[in-house]
Amino acid sequence: MKYRYKTFDSSFYDTVCDFLIELSKDDRNHINWNWARWEWMVFHPEFDNSLADKIGLWFYHNELVGMTTYDHFFGEAFYAVKKGYEELEKEILKYAITTFSNENGLGIAVNDTDSHTRDLLLSYEFVKDKNTENILENIFEGRRFDYTLPTGIEVRNLDIKNDLSKHHKVLWEGFENEGDLPLDEQTIDKQKRMLSAPHLNSYLHVVAVNEDGVYVAYCGCWYNPKTDYAYIEPVCTVPQYRKMGIGKALVLEALKRCHSEGAKKAYVISDAPFYKSLGFVQHSHYNFYWKK
């Protein structure tokens, strides 16, 4: 078969989303790289957008059948092909190695059950690394989403248009960044870009607000009606409001809202007891393989 290779530009954004949606239906080995992780990455402030034209796309006629991308920066990559187009794998893998390696080489996460990809990487002199990714799943059928909140705390939708600075602040403090909160124009522009993600549904992104109107916790949740699952990313609580059940309440509220929109399950990249206490169970585990 004859394939056409193209470099990524913004006109292919939704094409890649649809490719990843179809991939997750056919092959749950790649659920760690679902459409929502792609969207979160591309619009994340730390994503190096200047490298985006290096993302490789392979088409058969007008159908995207294979792709590879770096993860935020060079040094880690993801690649996949649709079923029936496995003959493309070696070409795409070679492209990823040549294009996305940095001074430390290249890392690719492989599902523990995916012996085919593991053996292919080993044949290209990748070696298993200690780094891992873990996926937890929460199936909604029969689940309850009840929670309680401390006095003075209220759950609200993320206000994308009016509360950019509050969102920026809760992320900065919630992930315990050092130093003063940066408010320079470049930083604010990056925050605006993050909240401009085309499939971001503010109803599914929830915040906890104190009596002074300050955001004290945040849960981002992504759902596309073309799928049956939601994706949690990110979750944070500012230090002085932790261990009060606020983070738990936000995740449960976000899951309840996703369920009302049609989602039947949710995934999160984590192995934290916090999520397991909310009914998440083991789904899949990934080992990284590295080529120096």
Image (cartoon, rainbow, N blue to C red):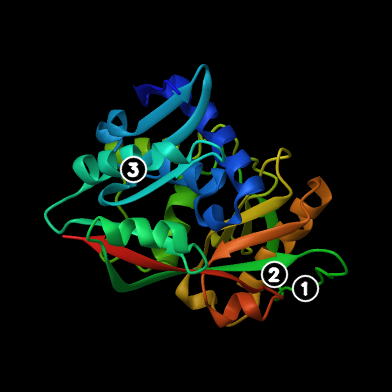
Query: Is residue 43 visible in this depiction of the protein?
Result: no
Label 1 sits on a secondary structure element that is: loop
Q: CA distance from mark 2 to mark 3?
A: 45 Å
Q: Which residue is mark 2?
A: 249
Mark 1–mark 2 CB contact (< 8 Å): yes
Name the residue at 28% across, 37% down: 186
Quarter of the picture containing the N terminus is: top left
The residue beneath circle 1 is 147
Residue 264 image offset from top left, x and y in percent: 78, 55
Q: Percent position (x, y) of residue 117? A: 42, 57
Kind of residue sitting beneath label 2: Ala
Return the residue at label 3.
90
Q: Amino acid at mark 1?
A: Tyr
Residue 3 placement (x, y as % from top left): 41, 22
Q: Quadrant of residue 155?
A: bottom right
Q: State whether residue 280 is above or below residue 101.
A: below
Labels 2 and 3 touching (C-beta < 8 A): no
Q: Earlier in the sequence, mark 3 or mark 1?
A: 3
Q: Which numbered mark, 2 or 3, is in the foreground of this view?
A: 3
Whether label 3 touches label 1, CB < 8 Å: no
Q: CA distance from mark 3 to mark 1?
A: 49 Å
The residue type indicated by label 3 comes to Lys
Q: Residue at x 73, y 59 (%)?
A: 265
